[in-house]
């Protein structure tokens, strides 16, 4: 919100002092402190509504730009409605136009700068998330390609697991291999840090998924407690990251098959 506040203050002084004669100047009958406070509140609500405060990990700069413009336009609409309802007159449209341009530009440049910093950090191995993929066929290959296309997202694929033990060691795509079978999954989670588990195969192809030996809490290789409760949630067909990771479009296809399978077993959550 600091950029929004600074944009309005800058627009105020530009309109009052810096524009050519005939365009500069502001009415003295308007309480700009009330307008300023209203903008902060309205813009915060609009930014939250469009998801500006979401993680930088999965979103390109173009996504942020579109949603910044959308939030600012919505904010201007609500602000004008507020001014009309409370009979606050004398607000300069030119001032609001300058504020809009400064705000969109400032926020976009800030997001771009932060994205560059995060991409640099992730290229050096910092701020990464470890991903394990269940499956090793076409869907798994699609998930891997999707993740590889978003290198700046900081995702690191640890490997794939498969239901067939004889596929262990097999190449899936782009040099990623099957690192274990489902019987090895519990031990792998005990000794490795796994942030996200992506199902790239229908659960109906996995024998009795409810019996997988996963623990709600385990220990990573550093001896620190690691929460695997999200993985247990995924076992019931509710992937905790669905809609928020690079393999989402493949995950959704898996969900459709998994939900059908779980429904047949009577295990699907409401």
Image: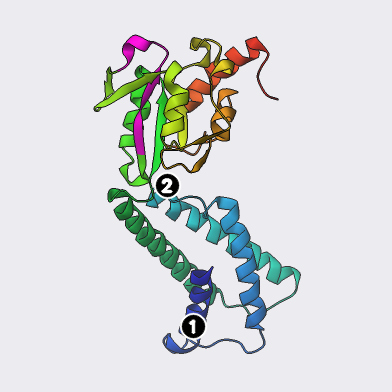
Question: In this figure, which residue is indicated by the disc labeled 1?
Answer: 15
Question: In this figure, which residue is indicated by the disc labeled 2?
Answer: 59
Q: Position of residue 115 (x, y in %)?
A: 37, 55
Q: Residues within 10 Å of mark 2 (few under 14, many from 20)?
A: some
67 horizontally vs 268: left or right: left
Q: Residue furthest left?
A: 175
Q: Position of residue 168 (x, y in %)?
A: 32, 16
Splitting the image into 4 quarters, where does residue 169 fall? top left
Tag 1, which secondary structure? helix
36 w.r.t. 158: above or below: below
The span shown in magenta is: 156-168
Check the picture and name the quadrant holding the N terminus. bottom right
Residue 250 is at least partly visible in this image: no
Q: Position of residue 175 (x, y in %)?
A: 24, 27
Q: Is residue 51 magenta?
A: no
Closer to the camera, 75 or 119?
Answer: 119
Q: Residues within 10 Å of mark 1 (few under 14, many from 20)?
A: many
245 horizontally vs 47: left or right: left
Q: Is residue 162 magenta?
A: yes
Tag 2, which secondary structure? loop
Q: Residue furthest front?
A: 223
Residue 229 is at least partly visible in this image: yes
253 w.r.t. 19: above or below: above
């Amino acid at each position: 919100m600091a950029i929004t506040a600074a944009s309005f203050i800058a627009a105020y002084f530009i309109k009052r002092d810096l524009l050519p004669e005939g365009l500069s100047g502001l009415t003295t009958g308007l309480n700009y402190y009330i307008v300023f406070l209203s903008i902060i509140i309205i813009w915060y609500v609009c930014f939250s509504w469009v998801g500006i405060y979401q993680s930088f990990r999965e979103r390109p700069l173009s996504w942020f730009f579109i949603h910044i413009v959308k939030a600012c336009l919505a904010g201007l609409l609500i602000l004008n409605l507020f001014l009309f309802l409370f009979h606050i007159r004398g607000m300069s449209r030119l001032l609001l136009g300058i504020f809009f341009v400064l705000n969109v530009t400032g926020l976009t440049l800030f997001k771009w700068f932060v994205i560059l910093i995060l991409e640099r950090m992730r290229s050096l191995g910092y701020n990464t998330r470890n991903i394990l993929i269940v499956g090793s066929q076409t869907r798994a290959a699609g998930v891997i390609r999707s993740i590889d296309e978003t290198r700046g997202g900081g995702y690191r694929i640890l490997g794939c697991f498969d239901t067939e033990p004889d596929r262990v060691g097999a190449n899936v795509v782009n040099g990623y291999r099957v690192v274990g079978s489902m019987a090895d999954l519990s031990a792998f989670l005990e000794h490795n840090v796994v942030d996200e588990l992506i199902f790239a195969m229908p659960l109906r192809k996995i024998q009795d998924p409810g019996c997988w030996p996963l623990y709600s809490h385990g220990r990573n290789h550093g001896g620190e407690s690691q929460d695997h409760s999200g993985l247990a949630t995924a076992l019931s067909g509710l992937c905790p990251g669905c809609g928020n990771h690079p393999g989402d479009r493949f995950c959704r296809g898996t969900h459709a098959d998994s939900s059908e399978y779980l429904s047949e077993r009577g295990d699907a959550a409401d």
